[in-house]
């Protein structure tokens, strides 16, 4: 015996408004019902590798103002909660996996409209023209650990310069980054934020030495 198959047609805007109005103020039927491990796994697999619906979108000033007023005085949904080390690791790995996707990288670059920050601007103004800023996702280098977007490159040379912020890179070891690029035939120089701000002259001299290993025209500036 053949079973009837019902295909749900998309609701019109008018119907959506009616449904929304009818459900306004009502508690969702599944609120408070815990999801089974099987359901959690299915949801996780369904969303794996997919960016959130809001990523890459731009809210209007009016929408931002409304959201700000609606949330004024209300605590953050996750305020006071503590994630376990396991949860942190899962979230970190999920984020890293997303960033391996080139389409996701391009989408985020367009959404963020990336520009050099104050630290990168200072370093860019400090160094010769052959030191080019590419930290706006305009250049990607494939390493054995994944795709990397360096902060600066030396034009005409297989060399990159990374600027490590004191806060965002505090748990990183610059030697690991240097080794990662070294494994694919690139030389890497890493400067920390405090060095660029407090030891500017030394940073410039080290950059010029880094360049002049292959281009001797910059030796006179050291």
Image (spheres, rainbow, N blue to C red):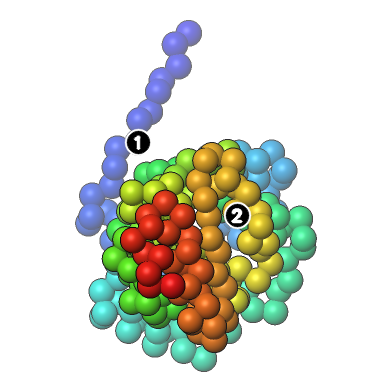
Q: Residue 45, image x and y in percent? A: 58, 39
Q: Residue 24, image x and y in percent? A: 41, 68
Q: Earlier in the sequence, mark 1 or mark 2?
A: 1
Question: Who's the residue at 65% across and 41% down the image?
Answer: 41
Q: Which residue is mark 1?
A: 8
Mark yes or no: residue 21 visible: no
Give the alpha-carbon distance from disc 1 to disc 2, as whole Å: 52 Å
Along the line of sight, which residue is nearer the eye, 55 or 78?
A: 55
Along the line of sight, which residue is nearer the eye, 83 or 35?
A: 83
Please indicate whether residue 96 sits to the left or right of residue 109 in the image: right
Name the disc covering residue 177, or none: 2
Q: Is residue 214 above or below residue 219?
A: above
Question: Who's the residue at 77% across and 63% down the image?
Answer: 84
Quadrant assignment for the C terminus: bottom left
Q: Residue 162, image x and y in percent? A: 50, 62
Along the line of sight, which residue is nearer the eye, 166 or 80?
A: 166
Q: Quadrant of residue 7?
A: top left
Give the secondary structure at mark 2.
helix
């Amino acid at each position: 015996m053949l079973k009837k198959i019902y295909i749900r047609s998309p609701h019109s805007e008018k119907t959506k408004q009616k449904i929304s109005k009818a459900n306004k103020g009502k508690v969702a039927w599944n609120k408070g019902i815990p999801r089974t491990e099987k359901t959690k796994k299915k949801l996780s697999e369904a969303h794996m590798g997919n960016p959130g619906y809001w990523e890459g979108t731009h809210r209007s000033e009016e929408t931002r103002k409304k959201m700000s007023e609606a949330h004024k005085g209300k605590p953050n949904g996750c305020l006071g909660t503590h994630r376990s080390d396991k949860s942190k690791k899962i979230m970190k790995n999920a984020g890293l996996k997303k960033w391996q996707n080139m389409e996701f990288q391009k989408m985020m670059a367009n959404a963020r409209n990336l520009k050099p920050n104050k630290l990168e601007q200072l370093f860019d103004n400090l160094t010769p023209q052959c030191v080019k800023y590419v930290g706006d996702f305009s250049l990607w280098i494939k390493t054995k650990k994944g795709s990397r977007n360096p902060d600066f490159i030396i034009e005409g040379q297989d060399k990159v310069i990374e600027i490590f912020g004191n806060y965002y890179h505090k748990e990183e070891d610059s030697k690991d980054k240097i080794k990662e690029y070294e494994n694919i035939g690139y030389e890497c120089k890493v400067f920390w934020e405090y060095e660029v701000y407090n030891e500017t002259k030394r940073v410039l001299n080290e950059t010029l030495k880094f360049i002049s290993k292959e281009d001797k025209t910059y030796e006179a500036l050291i």
